[in-house]
Structures are given as C-alpha cells and as structure tokens.
Amino acid sequence: IMPSSENLSLARVDIEENKPIAEKIIVIEKPKLTFEEELALASVDAGLKLSKKCTACHSLKSGGPNGVGPTLWNIVNAPKASINGYSYSSGLTSIGGIWTIQDLNLWLKSPKKYAPGNKMSFAGLRKIKDRANMIAFLNSISDEPIPNNGLN
C-alpha cells in the first residue's frame, strides 16, 4: 500500500551558496634603510660569509698574493689601482682617488657601471645590506681599520 502524497511532508532545505569570505591582510613592510644606516648596523661576520665569493679571485690575507684580482687587505682608503704587482685595466686606473667607503659601495653595487671597461667579472651586490656588511668586513681586514666604518 502506498500512502498518498497528501500525507507526505516535504522537507525544505535552504542551501547557502559558498561565497568566499574576503579577509583583509595587512602586510607591514620594514622601512628601507639608507646605506649609512645599514653601515651603522653592519656585521663583520655577515661580510665574512659574503667574502667567500671574493676568494676565488682575491686574497684577503695580510701579505697575501694577487690572484686573478688584487689582494684586498688594506683596501679601504687605499689609492685605487695601486696594489704592487697587479696589472689594472685602464677603466680603473683612469678613475684615480682612494677607495672611500662611498666608492666601495658604488663599486660593489656594480663594478661595470662604476668603472666601465674594468676586468672584474663580478656582477655586484644588489642589496644595500650586503654591501654594508661586505664593506664592514673589508674595513676589518686592515692594519688600521677606520673607526665606526667611517661613520661619525
């Protein structure tokens, strides 16, 4: 026996649409520091780690020999293109002056832009923080490091 449809109660189910819930995500960016601010916070140890890239071509030791590139001991505040026994390109010898902290920053950012025609194949260090750490390290490998990495 089949009941009549009059006795059946139909259940009504409301189906909610699956709507994505919009969430607001707030991203807090660290403020970009100037080169001088990064230099004030620079780490010699972090620069030492970065310097591993340099050792393929440069000596970092006092009295170390020139390699594909000149030794980098005492490079901060040294006259440019002046390491005895190393043959520099005219792209670098024509610049003159000394390796100031600011000059090293520009050189390490892009050797090819700083001294077009130089022999260095290294592309450079894009990050300001890396350059500041490298310069802090280079300053430390000196007979007379500059106090405070040259900052007043």
Image (spheres, rainbow, N blue to C red):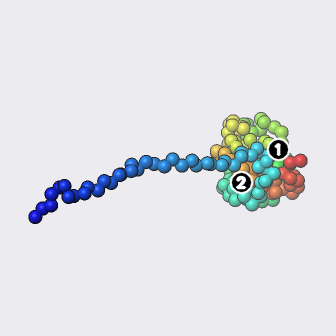
Quadrant into which the N terminus falls: bottom left
In this view of the protein, which residue sits in the foreground, 151 or 93?
151
Residue 146 in the image, given as x and y percentages of width and height: 87, 52
Residue 74 in the image, given as x and y percentages of width and height: 82, 53
Mark carried by residue 58:
2
Question: Relative to residue 5, is residue 47 drawn left or right?
Answer: right
Question: Relative to residue 100, is residue 51 drawn left or right?
Answer: left
Say which residue label 1 marks: 100
> Tag 1: residue type?
Thr
- Marks 2 and 1 close (CB-CB < 8 Å): no
**Element on which disc 1 rests:** loop
Give the Cα separation between the discs numbered 2 and 1: 19 Å
Query: Residue at left 78%, top 36%?
Result: 95
Q: Residue furthest bottom?
A: 1
Residue 68 in the image, given as x and y percentages of width and height: 68, 51
Residue 103 in the image, given as x and y percentages of width and height: 78, 42
Query: Residue at left 62%, top 48%?
Result: 27
Mark carried by residue 75:
none
Q: Is residue 43 visible?
A: yes
**Element on which disc 2 rests:** loop
Dot 2 or dot 1: first in sequence order is: 2
Tag count in the figure? Answer: 2
In this view of the protein, which residue sits in the foreground, 50 or 65?
50
Q: Is residue 43 above or below residue 118?
A: below
Q: Nearer the viewer, mark 2 or mark 1?
A: 1
> Tag 2: residue type?
His
Q: Residues within 10 Å of mark 1 (few under 14, many from 20)?
A: some
Query: Residue at left 39%, top 49%?
Result: 17
Q: Residue furthest front?
A: 6
Query: Residue at left 33%, top 54%?
Result: 13
In this view of the protein, which residue sits in the foreground, 82 or 29?
29
